[in-house]
Amino acid sequence: GTAETSPTYVTVKEAARIMTAHPVTVRRLIADGKLGRYSVEGQLRVKVSDIHAYMARAGQSSPTIDLDERARQLLSRSR
């Protein structure tokens, strides 16, 4: 199904990976009301569309960027 390829809700850890931020930052955004707080089967979840909307508002490009590519750029820059 399509649910696996693009989940509607992700964990804080997954949200942090999408935003290339720290999970603590994600929790702070939820606490500040900048990201919606959802409970799925008793677990805290973040809505993917909220992440995209927040990143768009924050002026960051949407996370369509390849994370591997970003990692390579960071590595080559530090040499």
Image: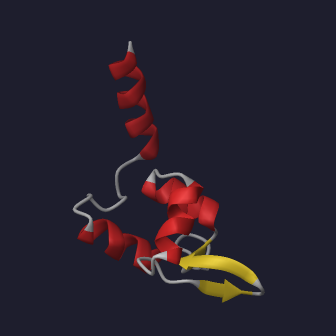
Which part of the image, by quadrant, shows the C terminus?
top left
Whole-percent x, y for residue 67 in the image: 44, 45
The quarter in which the N terminus is drawn is: bottom right
Figure disc tally: 0
Of 79 and 28, nearer the camera is 28
* 54 over 64 or under it: above or below: below
Color scheme of the displayed model: secondary structure
Q: Is residue 2 visible?
A: no
At 67% from the left and 87% from the top, the residue drawn is: 39
Taking 46 as reference, is 23 above or below it?
Answer: above
Percent x, y of residue 35:
45, 77
Task: Please tell me in which quadrant of the rendered image residue 7 appears.
Answer: bottom right
| 7 over 23 or under it: above or below | below
The correct choice, above or below, for 52 with respect to 25 in the image is below
Work out which residue is located at the far left of the displayed protein and give it.
59
Residue 3 x/y as whole percent: 59, 79
* Residue found at x 46% / y 39%: 68
Q: Is residue 19 left or right of residue 13?
A: left
Residue at 70% x, 86% y is: 40
Q: Is residue 41 left or right of residue 34?
A: right
Residue 21 seen in render: yes
Q: Position of residue 72 (x, y in %)?
A: 41, 29
- Name which residue lies at 26% across and 69% down: 56
Q: Who is closer to the viewer here, 57 or 64? A: 57
Farthest top residue? 79
For this orientation, the residue located farthest to the right is 42
